[in-house]
Structure formats: C-alpha cells, structure tokens
Image (cartoon, rainbow, N blue to C red):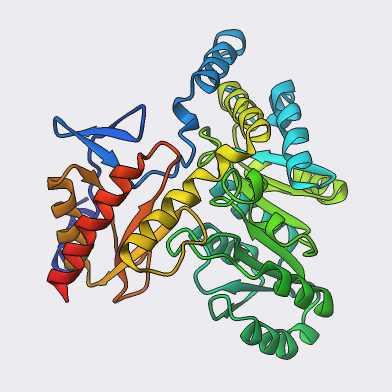
Amino acid sequence: MQSLDAFAGEKLTALDAKSLRRRLKPTRRHDGAIVERDGKRLISFSCNDYLGLSHHPAVRAAAAEAALNYGAGAAASRLVTGDHPLLSDLEKRLARLKGTEAACVFGSGYLANTGVIPTLVGPGDAIFVDALAHACIWAGAQLSGAKIVKFAHNDVADLARLLEAERPGVRHALVATDGVFSMDGDIAPLDQLSALCERHDAWLLSDDAHGVGVLAGGRGSGALFPDAKIPLQMGTLSKALGSYGGYLCGSQAVIDLLKTRARTLVYATGLPPASAAAALASLDIIQTNPAFTEQPLAKARLFTRRLGLPDAHSPIVPVVLGEADAALAASAALEGQGFLVVAIRPPTVPEGTARLRVAFSAEHADADVLRLADAIAVLRKAAA
C-alpha cells in the first residue's frame, strides 16, 4: 500500500528532524552489569535488573529446570489450559511479601495495569492519575471508559482539590500512581495519598515495578509507609526480580474478580513456567538477604553525593539535560568512555526534559559508580 508507506515515511522523517526516532541496537548482556554492543564491552547503567538476579546461578537454574520439566510455554490462557502450580505458588509468595490476602499474576506489568484498571472502573466512574504515571496506567485508564482526571505530580493538595470537585459526581473513584517513578526515581507520598483516598472513598493503586526488591528490605515502596492503606498493589517480576511478568496484590474478593473478568488475563496466554520459577527463586534470595536489597540505593547515593545532587530515593537517578540532541550527545560521549547510559527523550518524558536515566545495580563496583559520576560532571560543565 503506497499510502501506508508514505504515511510511515513522513512520520519517521518528522521524528528524525526532532532527534526522536528510536532504533533497536543488538546488545548482549553478561554477568556483572556488562553488556556487549558493536563488539565493545560496556558497563551498563541502563538496566532495571537492580540486583543482577536475571544472571544469578540459582535463578537461572530454577528457570532451566522448570523449562525442562514443564515446557517452554504456557500454551494458552490460564483459564483454558488449567492453572500451573508454579503460578499459584508465586501468587501466594507475592501476597505474603506485600501483606495482602491474595495476588494475581499477569503476563507482564503492562498487561496487569491495562487489565486491572478497566476491570475496576468504567463509564460513570473517575480515575485520578499522577501526571508522571507510567504509560500502562494511562493506557488502562483510557481503556476503562472512566473519566480521567490528571493531578500534578506528587501534589497531594492538587489531588485533594480535584477529588473535592469531581468525586461527588461519580460512582467509584480510583487514584493511580507509581510507587517509584521510573524516569525520575522519586517516591509517591503514599501515606498522604492513602489518607486522602480514605476521606473520599477512593481506591488507591500503586505501581511498585521499581520499588519491589530494592526498598524496605525488598518489600517495596508501600512498606516505607506502614500506616498507608493501599488496596491495589501492582508490580512486576521483570526488574529487581530478574524474571518476566506482572502482578496485582489485593483482597481475595478483588483477586477473584480479576481472575474472572480481567481481559488481559482471560484472553492472554499465561506466564511460562520458567518465568514463574525464576521469580520464586529471586524471592527466596531477596527474603533471606535483606541487606543485599539495600545495595542499589547505596550505589545511587554514592553517585548523587559525588555530583552534589540531592540524595537518591531509589536506584534511579535522572540527569536532566533539556533537549533531545544534548541527551543523545551525552549518551554517545559516555559510550566512548565505556558506559552505557541511554538517553531518554519525549514522549517518554516531557518536552525540554530529555535526560540520562542512570539506573544502579548491586553489581556495580563503587569505583565504576564514581568514575561515571566524574564523567557526567565533565559533560554537565561543558554543556552549561
């Protein structure tokens, strides 16, 4: 279809003009936060494998054994093929970790949020979403048909104002936020959000994809606020847990509803046994070695202190450079020095806030963290 190719070509040309086109680069990951790209070995500060568990011998062995015993794939929806025992075991472990009655495992974190949100709210309801919430929260909100109300990032006063104005006119209300924000590394004020939700009979959903495994002894961002009531605790298996998949922890009634009505569970192939087994092995490591979970944040704070930045709150530290060209140039310069630090550009982040997103792992050597900080300091000075 000539018109289709013309349409795609025009879009790509426009993206190229703004330095916003994305390209996949073949990259092989090795142990110890090392990647290989274009024949060069680089120290990666762009990976969400915060504990290096995707390469841990026990995790790999568990995945391999499950694949050998149960096959490479799940073959169909969990409701069609029958529920694999490993998934039931994983859900029980996740519920214990999060202190909830039950859990539901999905094929990915994106599938979790795009399934959970439309199951719980719809036309006649409202969903209040943090302005910087992850794209899958926004996608779930749009799929729901509920009224979407955006509140300023981590601004409790703005949310309170909006709830006062909008809550009386809708049947149900859901407040959705990241626990740890994936591009800024800051933490939602879950205690204040919880109190506000209780006051307005709103349901709080926190996406803890970047908190579980690395905050509060591995229990995640919600555990930093022991008095907060978070009825919907979402997360992923694909970051600190080193596997793949997503989950929602909540009450038994909520989980039972999701397992019969969430379209991304009912109509999606189940999680492969190897992924479930890997996640279970990672949970064993995290829960028996809480000191290990503290290392990514410690590395991040070593970095921020070296640069004179405010203390990191999570293993994610943004170095905002402004325009996309500046971020791309800084990323290329760092690659020339042996570091992989990917440039993040709009629409992932707002216009004018293109950045280096630096992600820290327990596998990073302190000397490499300091060397990266010094290299970035030189780049920032040159750009000033």
Q: Is residue 272 above or below residue 103?
A: above
Query: Total of numbered circles in the picture?
Result: 0
Residue 263 picture location, percent across and down: 66, 47
> In the displayed image of the protein, which residue is found farthest to the top?
69
Residue at position x 81%, y 76% from top?
171
Residue 227 picture location, percent across and down: 80, 64
Q: Left of 339 or right of it: where is 151?
A: right
In terms of depth relative to the viewer, which is nearer, 161 or 254?
161
Residue 320 picture location, percent across and down: 31, 69
In terms of depth relative to the viewer, which is nearer, 62 or 318?
318
Residue at position x 77%, y 64% from top?
228
Q: Is residue 229 above or below residue 339?
A: below
Q: Left of 21 or right of it: where is 318?
A: right
Is residue 8 something that shows in the picture? no
Residue at position x 47%, y 42% from top?
50
Residue 267 picture location, percent across and down: 63, 39
Residue at position x 22%, y 72% from top?
323
Report the quarter where the C terminus lies.
bottom left
Q: Quadrant of residue 140?
A: bottom right
Is residue 353 something that shows in the picture? yes
Q: Left of 44 or right of it: where is 333?
A: left
Q: Quadrant of residue 3?
A: bottom left
